[in-house]
Amino acid sequence: MPRAEPAASMAVLENPPESPCFGCGPRHARGLRLAFERRAAADGSDEIVCQYTPKADEIGWPGLMHIGLLFLVMMETSYWTALTLGGRVMTVRGPVTYESLRLPRVGRTFRTRARIDEKAKPEFRIRCVAEDANGRAHATMTSSWVRESRALVEKAGITLPAYLLEDMDP
């Protein structure tokens, strides 16, 4: 499980093969199978990065990635930022801001970069940017995250894999 430790210049984040997630589950039959890296940003802070190339059947308008899938990639990057840099399993309380400027083109790799923008217990604000290979923004999003407890998850009747439960507050 990722921990909140200083990053080397780049470290691939491990996602257990049993992850059932549509966005990042490595074995999900129809999922995006997103992968993430922890990198040191230019200013010395840590950020989580994901690179993705939209496939021909992931379109909204012809030749352009579906906006909902772009949003999914940004939310997944934000989740991995909260988990890795925040050090605990968290749930999103919603996007605070989202701005779509241009959609990625099918077949062209883009990246999302996210970092903790603000820590105000019990909440974390994560800022995520989707950009093309030249650094031109596709979209920006700020989301609010809070730590999740085992008790709340169990009360909701949700069964989580052991690798997530072990890192949660009671």
Image (cartoon, rainbow, N blue to C red):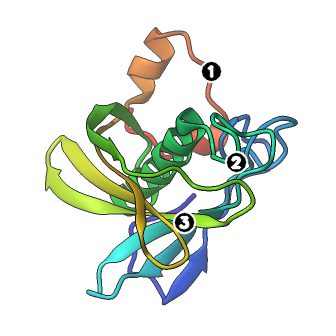
Hey, what amino acid is under mark 3? Answer: Arg
List x then y, in percent, for residue 7: 44, 82
Horizontally, residue 79 falls left or right of residue 148, namely right
Instruction: Work out how far the residue at label 1 is from the one at label 2, CA to CA, in angstroms.
Output: 39 Å
Hey, what amino acid is under mark 1? Answer: Thr
- Which of discs 3 and 2 lies nearer the camera? The answer is 2
- Which of discs 3 and 1 lies nearer the camera? The answer is 3
Q: Residue at x 46, y 66 (%)?
A: 48
Hey, what amino acid is under mark 2? Answer: Gly
- What number of labels is visible? 3
Residue marked by disc 3: 111
List x then y, in percent, for residue 65: 63, 45
Q: Residue lying furthest front in this view?
A: 62
Q: Which mark is residue 159?
A: 1
Q: Where on the picture, by quarter, is residue 106?
A: bottom right
Q: Residue at x 44, y 10 (%)?
A: 155
Mark 1–mark 2 CB contact (< 8 Å): no
